[in-house]
Amino acid sequence: MDLRFTAAEQAFREELRAWLATTVPAVGPPPAHDDWPARRAYDLAWQRRLFDAGYAGVDWPVEGGGRGSSPVEQLVFKEECERAGAPYVGVNFVGLLHAGPTIIAEGSPSQRERYLPPILRGEEVWCQGFSEPDAGSDLASLRTRAVRDGDDYVVNGSKIWTSHAEVADFCELLVRTGGEGNRGISWLIVPMSSPGIEIRPLRTIEGTTEFAQLFLNDVRVPVANRVGEENDGWRVTMVTLSFERGTAFVGELLEAVRLLGELQAFGTRLDLFTGHPALLERIGHLRAAFDALWALTKRNVSEATQTGVPGIGGSVFKLAFSEHAQALGNLAMEMLAQASLCADPLHGPHGPLGNAEQVHNWYKSINLTIAAGTSQVQRNIVAERILGLPRAR
Amino acid sequence: MDFRVDEAQRELAGGIRSMLEGRLPLERIRSSEGAPRTVGADDWAALGETGVFALTLPEPAGTGLGLADAAVVFEELGRSLVPGPLVGTFLAAARDLVPGAAAGRAMVGVCAGRGGPPWMLEHLSSLDAALCPGDLPSGGPTLLSAVRDAPTAQRVAEPLDPLTPLWQLTRLPAAQPLEDPEWRLFSDGAVLTAALQVGHAARTLELAVAYAKERHQFSKPIGSFQAVKHLCADMLVRAEVARAAVHAAACLADAPDVLAAEATTAGSTPAAFLRRSAAGAKLLADEAAIANARAAIQVHGGMGYTWEVPLHLHLKRSHVLATSFGAKGELAALLGSLPAGARAEP
């Protein structure tokens, strides 16, 4: 057990920190949340800066054009970017973390050549068409059908929870090409400019249109756009599901720590703790929890660095983090009292109350136990795959 | 960085586990339930011979290992329900405060030193001395010598844990102040107590999972029902999160350069940062041990409420351990009062 970074890891951190210190101040403030074209431009411009500096695809293997860094270096990368206030991965998320790695692992040479460089250079945006209105936790029951017609598939169906659909160039689409279950699924690259795709934005609890529902009506997709064999798409998908080797929530964790500090400062400024020591204890408990989750992150990335696969830690981390992040959101709403009733930045006699950020974080925390595997499904995974309890389904 | 439990540490844990299985199996431990002395001098000396109390002492007196290695060993001691003043004896041995502690020929207790009178002292009739780690958050540790002869000591008839005999004292014996400017008695003691708690949390998880696989109701193993599965999954989460926290605090205690760097990043001092890490680990490990024992009892149903299964012993011991080196409210208040700018990286 050793928390000491190696000389190489330390050198990587210092070089990156120096670059971020000169680069981040040159980046303007992020655009409005609902201004999707501006967000696309902003996020792509950041990706381009990373590319020019040699930091694009830190976590991609060298053969895919990436930097081939170890999970520990990825942790350092995410930590330094977060601390420097660098832009988030944003609209580049699906390309960098799902579609790109899938194409690296399973794509043909011509697919790799065509699709990977524009992701790294910040030129093309991807979205994900996996979940369906009737296929959420039970993804393998998806019903969007692709039927062969000459050199094309003709696709009909609907996809949901598709982030960045309005500004995406391509969609990684799971379709049913065979029989029921996970053996009849294929993985397709679908240009979002294809005729027959309709996008309906979904308004989330935050009031913004973070997701969309896609409707696909007789959308023609060349068979050449299939990644992997026909009906082998489930395996293709699983290959990259664990791509983020222990670092998936590093940004969110550090953000939660920052917001906890601000909440504590808010409570001290307004003298909320004197009469209510229980509030202070809840702050302390969350600090212990987030410190522990930072330690667990280090354990998970160590495991992934040494063995190539994440250990049991991913589900464990997500279950614990989502719970504590919700506790932070709830505590913030309680302490802000009436200032929690709006997401407009309010000012008090001592300066800004910081309510807007806390309220947005509270909104987002609600989704943490749902997105990327509900906590209920995660508990089943932990109980069955780690603890070996019998499967019931 | 490689924060995994390494090969040598796994071997160390395995060695301790097989020693305990041979020397102190559960039946032997349980045979002294309710007795005024729940761990014999021979068994204590055997623990000493194995090196349990001298792990961090330099060779040849000890094995020259670190607190992280000790945490791995203490997890095993907790898991196996080994009774006795383990943490106090280790702390006294590591500082050479009480002759014979390292070899297991002396027993050193821990006195919370607050809240009284009456003060409660565990294992009093076996003790050669007791450590008062000092109140949180100010410190001020002392050593109570000749504690066994404390004139006002009175043994309680119904201690919560039948394996932790308990005395009440209306007056504390004379105390000798200890130099501990960096709160290391508290930090090390909290880490080791937390390690014991992780052992309890891991053991009750094992017992719950084994029972959920074997117990059938409605013609199925009860572990196939999601309500039971989810209890077990939450137990694993609590144990793993607490274990990571304990190991991180122990690693920081072992590596002054890493601790100094992390403390600087957090705008803190090494001693304060270590105390924060130790307090957080203790808080989460206490919770994990108690909550897991309760969940394991729930999984066992009515049988969990009896002395037929050892779950009550884990629950009761966890409550005993939760009262030393900071109780829940004290630890949470300490952590909540840290400067707001302090960042989370341990």
Image (spheres, rainbow, N blue to C red):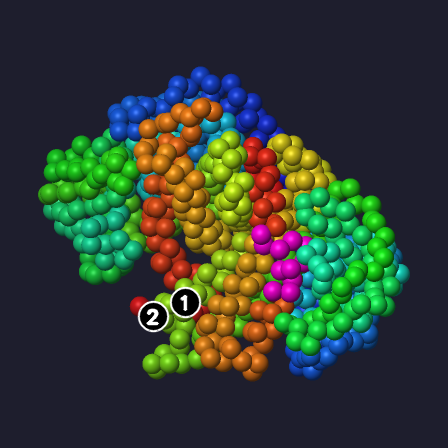
Tell me if residue B49 comes above or below residue A98 in the rendering.
below
Parent chain of label 2: A
The answer to whether residue A59 shows anywhere in this view is: no
Callout 1, which amino acid? Lys
- The magenta span reads B319-329
Q: Nearer the viewer, residue A257 or A58?
A: A257
Residue at the disc numbered 2: A392
Residue at left offset 44%, top offset 24%:
A349
Question: Which residue in the rendered view is the most extreme toward the right?
Answer: B99
Q: Name above or below for residue A195 compared with residue B154.
A: above
Please state the horizontal and vertical placement of residue B265, each as a whole percent of the image: 61, 32
Answer with the quarter of the image where residue B284 lies.
bottom right
List x then y, in percent, for residue B95: 83, 53
Question: Could you tell me which residue is drawn at 35 percent across and 58 percent down?
Answer: A377
Q: Secondary structure at mark 1?
A: helix
- Examine the structure image and report whether residue B325 is included in the region drawn in magenta: yes
Q: Left or right: where does residue A370 sit relative to residue A134?
A: right
